Image (spheres, helix red, strand yellow):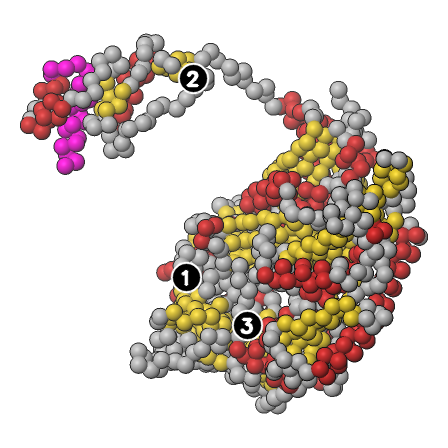
Amino acid sequence: MKDTPLSNCERDFLLKAIEEKKRLDGRQTYDYRKIKITFGTDYGCCFVDLGKTRVMAQVSSELVAPKENRPNEGIMFFNTELSPLASPAFEQGRQSELSVKLNRQLERCLRNSKCIDTESLCVVSGEKVWQIRVDVHMLNNDGNLMDAATIAAITALCHFRRPDVSIQGEEVTVYSVEERDPIPLSIYHMPISVSFSFFQQGTYLLVDPSEREERVMDGLLMIAMNKHREICYIQSSGGIMLLKEQVMRCSKIASVKVSEITELITQALLNDKNARKAGGRGGFAESMPQERITALKMDETPVETTDVTERANDIVKKTEAPPQTVPSPVVPAPGVGQVGLGLQNTWGIEEDDDDEEEGMGEEDSGEEAGGKVAKMEVDQHKKEQQRGDVVEISDSEEEEVVILHPETPVPKNQKGSSSHQKGAATSKKKQKK
Amino acid sequence: MMEVCGSSNVTLREFGCEQSLLSRPDGSASFVQGDTSVMAGVYGPAEVKVSKEIYDRATLEVLIQPKVGLPSVRERSQEQCVRETCEAALQLSLHPRSSLTLILQLLHDDGSLLSCYLNAACMALMDAGLPMNCLFCGVTCAINKEGEIITDPTAAQEKESRALMTFAIDSTERRVMMSSTKGSFSVHEMQRCIAVSQKASEKIFQFYRDSVRRRYSKTL
Amino acid sequence: MVILLDPTAHLKLISWRSFDPLNERDLTESFIRVDPLVLRSARGRCRFLPVCRTYIAPADSSSSTRRSRCGTGGMFSCLKDKVGEVLVPGDEFSFQADDTISLSGPAKPEKVVCGPGLRRSGDRLLVSKSGVLRHKQPNVFWIDSQQRRYVPAKGETVIGIVTAKSGDVFKVDVGGSEQASLSYLAFEGATKRNRPNVQVGDLVFAQFIIANKDMEPELVCMDSSGRANGMGVFGGGGLLFTVSLGLVRRLLSPHNEVRADLEQLFPCELVVGMNGRVWTRASTVQQTLIIANLLQSCDTMTSQQRQQLFRRVQQGAL
């Protein structure tokens, strides 16, 4: 499916609005949209709403063999899924340019910045390490997927707990959640990316572009930073020339935004921890906005089952037992076995030979009743059939007869009942011509 | 042979739904049953690929996205179940040579997943305003070792059950539109499960109606 | 009698005008042309760009559609009872509500015209969309829903985006399942020599001349007498945004409250396409944005909430 095209008028209006420092949703130049972080029921599941953009991240772990060149380190694996849910332009199961780009950026932001202690993920050196897999699903694309994805991924990583293991000699035991409390990952710092979009060759700058703004922007600068103001990763795309001052200014803005977002994430994690400790139910069911008129919830409801058993018995009683359908096999022709009733063979019979077919049908039934062999040979040339015993395949002389004396019913007189049909067929043929 | 079913287990967990929560799809819904939750989005009637075009009706595609990794055989079979149910409920012949895409994203699995997929699909289709003959809902029943019927089982209950059945029930005559079963059971047990599902479906249909009523409450 | 516009012929959406609940005109009136709707508010400041309105009576369109008639007894009252109620797909009305002939009542057969969301199946009337049942005097019923995807219908005016020029036609995206074609000759005053100036990415306000499920939809930018009548290329300096189809219909119905509230705010131009696209332009960028945001939030507000919000805007809260 294609995305809705962008009209010239939208483009012009957006650029004009940006010149006047106005944005479509009423934000200021440096404003982020509202960020909402919610957690799923299990550990390592995080939803991030950035305005209307919505992203889900799920972290999972698995014991695998380490890479040969790094036997003491766990493996981080990132997978970005651009589900068609997010935009009609996204297709399932195809690695689009955008998904590769996002995946690569996520890897560079979270793996290459060494924010996770991969050495602590080693179980047996050179043999078994934890592989931490981060699946990021885009659920709704309203611009700035990258920022939402990094927030979701790092929050999910902070939230995740891996199962505890113990090593006794050669044996590795993985404990389930019930046996031993799972262990959180050790995270050194939280890199968070902040996107800046540039318009009119870098004259205007906006933080957190929305989908329509992304469509008209000239270039994008992405700065990933942690709250200690360390830049973890920086990328500029779109082919705009930026001045040193611009990059410096952006990094200053980024440091402010990153500290705000980090604060938000810490608060969200703390809230979730408290809720879990208090035994309250977390998860998606609780995060559903109750006040919206588009949402409704119903409490646990009993289902009345008073007459269920009777009804079931009734139905079973009323249903007749299926008839025994294993008759003795019929042998319609040598080498052919048939069980049950089959359809009549209509091979080679044309639609316009109706009368002929009827006639034959009678004949056939008579034959079958007699219990005789009902083998039929179809002569494709003439569309006629003959008795099994009297097989005549190529009868060119008859065709001659037909051509020479089409009207005379000579063949009928000469031959038996079967040749009567021949005559009928051939005379029909003549009519068709 | 006939056991009395324990009435304590015949309950539906708390369930909820939110409609049109995503801005991009033409219709969307999230459905929650206990801890199981699914998000659904619908596009359509939209442009269709030439290879998938059907001359006299719309092409319905159902995609199920698991949380981790790529869709596997399990997802494919669930897609098939949901697609066939939706095809029966939708009036596809009204939009020939177009495509309808239904995307179901798993958010959390805690049992009765297929029925949750079906319910989310129905709400999303309704939100998209696609012409339908009837509504449908999914009910999962489990039969445990003692022969008791458990409706809307959790993952733990599913694991301990002897048989698991999911039925799609239509809203007009409460008929079974689709069934998917696992494990072994007698004819009696199946008929009882169907009867229970039909009873349970009434609660769900009432819920559908209530949520639509709530949604339009401001434009009455 | 029940006249059902056969939904398979896409008549269900044919000229929504004819289903206007507040429109007093009789449906039997054949094809009335109304001048471009140029509304002036009480203060004479608000101008709405021509919104081409065509009244297509069922009689006019009968040649292209099948209509089925059926005897009915209690159908009308049955439907009437449910007006204003929320219905969901699968709900049905039976034709044979009462077989007894009332001696005192009028013997005149009843006619019911069914709009979007209602569909006839045998001797029953089925609801196929969820929404509120609406009624317009004397006998028109339809379902009001908050759908977002547009399905083209003949006679409706829409806002399209030109996506390509191919030979003699422009390809226009209208948000439906297929791109519509627009001939370059279908503009006012256009000839083979004098081609209209249309660029890819331009907005056009156009009317469907062909729209059914089996054919490629076709648009024109002029009416039957060859006049532009408000249609054509437009859109300089304004903003395009999308709202639900239900809101668009509400906006276009005569004496609409939302529009009346909007007129109180500040002068603006508004082009409303039946496909859910709305274009607006006010004197400043800020005002244009305010109008766009107000309209987008109208679907989920009661009329009191809306009036409150509009009053706040008027007092300069934004």
Tell me the residue at 62%/78% (across/down): A240
Mark-to-mark CA distance, 3 and 1: 22 Å
Point out the residue furthest to the front here.
Answer: A69
Q: Are marks 3 and 2 on the same chain?
A: yes
Tell me the residue at 65%/40% (across/down): B74
**Eye-nearest disc, 3 or 2:** 3
In-front residue for pair C142/B62? B62
Tell me the residue at 68%/31% (across/down): B182
The residue that disc 2 covers is A338
Q: Chain of mark 2?
A: A
Circles 2 and 1: CB atoms closer than 8 Å: no
The residue that disc 1 covers is C216
Q: Are marks 3 and 1 on the same chain?
A: no
Q: Secondary structure at mark 1?
A: loop
Circles 3 and 2: CB atoms closer than 8 Å: no
Residue A56 placement: quadrant: bottom right
Q: Position of residue C183 (x, y in %)?
A: 37, 72
Q: Chain of mark 3?
A: A
Label 3: how many Cα within 10 Å (few below 14, some 14–19, many 20+): some
- The answer to whether residue C108 is seen in the rendering is no
Q: Position of residue A379 (x, y in %)?
A: 23, 24
In-front residue for pair A153/B67? A153
Point out the residue furthest to the right here.
Answer: A278
The residue that disc 3 covers is A6
The reply, left or right, for residue B63 in relation to residue A426 is right
Tell me the magenta residue range: A413-433
Q: Position of residue C200 (x, y in %)?
A: 46, 75
- The answer to whether residue A104 is seen in the rendering is yes
Q: Amino acid at mark 2?
A: Gln
